Image (cartoon, rainbow, N blue to C red):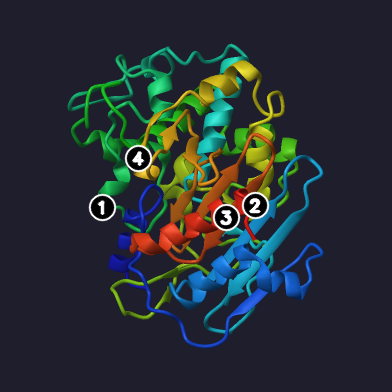
Amino acid sequence: MGVAAAAAAVAMAVGGVGAPAVSAMSGETASEVTAGTSSEAAGADSVQRGLDRLVRADGVPAALASVQGEGKGGRGRTYTAGVGDLATGAAVPRDGRVRIGSNTKTFTAVVVLQLVAEGKIRLDDTVDTYLPGLVRGDGIDGRKIKVRQVLQQTSGLPNYTKHDLRPRYYEPRELLDIALGYESEFAPGERWAYSNTNYVLAGLIVEEVTKRPVAQEIDRRIIKRLGLRHTYFPAPGDATIRGPHPKGYLQETPGAPLRDITELDPSWAWAAGQLISTNSDLNRFFTALLTPGRLLPEAQLDQMRTTVPADYFGKGARYGLGIVSRPLSCGDVYWGHGGSYPGYETRGGATDDGRAVDVAVTMQPTDKAVMSHVDEVVDTALCGRR
């Protein structure tokens, strides 16, 4: 793809909705259900029907889901629909790896909160406590922004991904400098607004406090600890996705052909959105996160789950410290984040009783109705409807 198209793909990435919606695809849809379900049960399964609808009616190239039943012994199922590679017609890899975008923010927030539990960071310290003199700009002053406000998206920092990013390698400080070239959105704590800049800043704080790369801290403190075998933070310059994965696609204008955008330098997303994972690993992560003592002590988990309204994520959604709560149609709530990255969208999370689901599609539709259908699959799975 051309430089302009790649730049557009980057610009619409981690926090927002991406490429224009595609028309319904022609051809057969490949569907798969595993973990002991029969083909008859698969045909009646509402999760499978939801994925099939996303492919046949909404035009996404592929859809994948992993569902975990209630409790530690809950049965897991994986599902696929569509085509994993439009050029070859290859099947969608079961539980294939995808770019998980802003789900990365929850991992970064966990590392910060672990450091809080260790007495190395305090949530109500200012950014300047850890990065003196670094955060200055038009209406921006790191002496007035608290770490808590960075994690909760109430800092007022402008979102660097709203501005012109080119498809190349970026150092984290470059990303922060892009944001600091613009005026503050509001005074710290005044209101809530989504900004990827907050999580670049959180990553820089982690690196300053630990003297190690944030990628290493995420790997050591979360990925290895939970045995997330299919989750990793790509090394600098690595634009590929390792292991089995469906291709990710971009449509530059409505009705235009889908273009393969699987390989893209992810450094522009860094601690706000660089991770690669699978639906099953995300289920394991969010389920563990909600269990006091697995990743966070109860005190820090309570802080993480202290929320403010965030209708950006849908009606009734609330944002904690790097985590989102959303209401379910059956009266419960679930906790997760979701992620947007050129070529991929992921949605899902877990409930307090151990139910978990994550759904991924292999393009970024701009038609909000398509993403509402993804959310419906999540709701259906967590509410137990078949």
SS of the residue under disc 4: helix
Give the percent coordinates (x, y) of residue 154.
33, 27
Q: Are the residues at dot 3 and dot 1 in contact (C-beta closer than 8 Å)?
A: no
Q: Which residue is mark 1?
A: 164
Q: Calculate the distance from the C-alpha at mark 2 to the C-alpha at mark 4.
A: 25 Å
Classify 182 as above or below 264: above
Q: Calculate the distance from the C-alpha at mark 4 to the C-alpha at mark 3.
A: 21 Å
Image quarter of residue 157: top left
Q: Which residue is mark 2?
A: 384
Left-right relation of 125 to 80: left
Give the percent coordinates (x, y) of residue 349.
58, 44
SS of the residue under disc 1: loop
Q: Quadrant of the C terminus?
A: bottom right
Mark 3 vs mark 1, foreground winner is: 3
Q: Calculate the distance from the C-alpha at mark 2 to the C-alpha at mark 1.
A: 43 Å
Q: Are the residues at dot 1 and dot 4 in contact (C-beta closer than 8 Å)?
A: no
Q: Amino acid at mark 3?
A: Thr
Structural crowding at the residue carrying mark 3, measured as other residues with C-alpha within 10 Å and reported as few (<14), some (14–19) or many (≥20): some
As drawn, the label of residue 380 is 3
Q: Calculate the distance from the C-alpha at mark 3 to the C-alpha at mark 2.
A: 6 Å
Mark 2 vs mark 4, foreground winner is: 2
Which callout, 2 or 1, points at the residue further toward the start of the chain? 1
Q: Amino acid at mark 1?
A: Asp
Give the percent coordinates (x, y) of residue 297.
66, 19
**Is residue 345 at all visible to an observer of this figure?**
no
Which callout, 4 or 3, points at the residue further toward the start of the chain? 4
Q: Amino acid at mark 4?
A: Asp
Structural crowding at the residue carrying mark 4, measured as other residues with C-alpha within 10 Å and reported as few (<14), some (14–19) or many (≥20): some
Q: Which residue is mark 4?
A: 311
Q: Calculate the distance from the C-alpha at mark 3 to the C-alpha at mark 1.
A: 38 Å
Give the percent coordinates (x, y) of residue 280.
68, 52
Which callout, 1 or 4, points at the residue further toward the start of the chain? 1
